Image: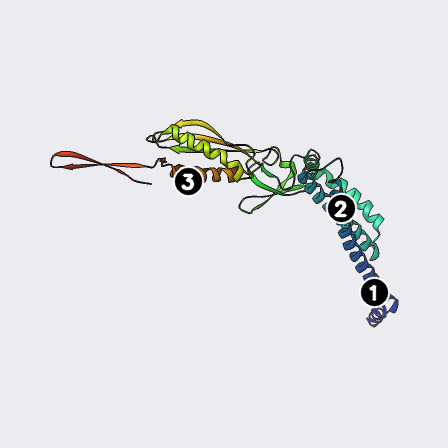
Amino acid sequence: MNSFYTRFLGYITNEALWILIGKSILKIIAILIASAIIIRIGKAMIQRIFKSREKGPRFISERREATLVKLLENVLTYVVYFVVIMMILETIGIPIRALLAGAGILGLAVGFGAQNLVRDIITGFFIIFEDQFSVGDYVRIGSFEGTVEEIGLRTTKIKSFNGELNIIPNGSIIEVTNFSIHNSVAVVDISIAYESDIAKAEQVIQELLQELPDKYEEIVAEPQLLGIQNLAASEVVMRITCEVQPTKHWLISRVIRKEVKNRLDEHGIEIPFPRLVLYNRKDGNNHVNQEKTRG
């Protein structure tokens, strides 16, 4: 027992051991600092390369640029981290060659059971290569709808209108609806009371629609009054369509409703509201009182 204690004490008090540990710690710190510098410089170079391409003959759209920049930054980070881990393992005395050989055999075995992962990566590659959608696009994928926050080789992140971040494996993406590529169309239905002058209402709305493109830059073309869309039980429904910038149809639809309501009020054109008819029986005679009430 005493001999073991003596050997152990001699081992931990060995000056050469602590010098080796100190050198290893300093080397690991130097590797981590160098990796952080390389990642920062690499990301700056990626940004600079894409900015310089904006002035070249082959201009890359902002959508595709944001996607490729994010992807290349992730690839750079993963590669540097892998090299750092290998260098740290070598520093602490773990044989890298034997580790990589064993990892290759293990990776081959795991690969047969990682078919979903391979499918996700292949699908992610084709999403980026074919430019199906890019970072910043407003898309609908399955039951998820929102703005694309990030596209990776394995997953796609979509932020919904309410702020939820949906992470979708690329292999499960079958159908995509992209709202950000082409101009959108705002469709607005306006209800007019049967008692109102329909011809006058059409003229007033038409004059208003001619003014809107100068007030709202999101409107691409002058809105069109298509005419009477429906004859409902208590109202005449007119339909307005307007070509707008991508994903701006919700905004312009609300704007058109407000503008039309204010203009119709200015000209005394009534928008239908519920009516209540009261029958009052008095002295054997039926007296009918008709009142207008708003719901």
How far apart are the alpha carbons under marks 2 and 1? 39 Å
Q: Residues within 10 Å of mark 3 (few under 14, many from 20)?
A: few
Q: Residue furthest left?
A: 283
Q: Earlier in the sequence, mark 3 or mark 1?
A: 1
- Tag on residue 174? none
Q: Which residue bears the numbered disc 3?
A: 262
In percent of width and height, residue 274 lies at 32, 37
Q: Is residue 267 left or right of residue 98?
A: left
Q: Residue at x 74, y 40 (%)?
A: 55
Residue 166 image offset from top left, x and y in percent = 59, 44
Which is more toward the observer, 235 or 32? 235
- Residue underneath mark 1: 22
Q: CA distance from mark 3 to mark 1?
A: 78 Å
Question: Quadrant location of residue 142?
Answer: top right
Residue at 82 percent of width and 62 percent of height: 26
**292 to the left or right of 159:** left
State the residue position of label 2.
48
Q: Quadrant of the N terminus?
A: bottom right
Three-letter code for the amino acid on which mark 2 is drawn: Arg
Closer to us: mark 3 or mark 1?
A: 3
Q: Which residue extends farthest right?
A: 16
Q: Nearer the viewer, mark 2 or mark 1?
A: 2
In the image: residue 8, left or right of residue 129: right
| Observer-nearest of 80 and 172 | 80
Badge 3 amino acid: Asn
Identify the element where label 3 is drawn: helix
Residue visible at 77% across and 47% down in the picture: 45
Q: Residues within 10 Å of mark 2 (few under 14, many from 20)?
A: few
Amino acid at circle 1: Gly
Q: Indicate which disc, 2 or 3, sits on the residue closer to the N terminus.
A: 2
Q: Is residue 264 visible?
A: yes
| Secondary structure at numbered mark 2 | helix
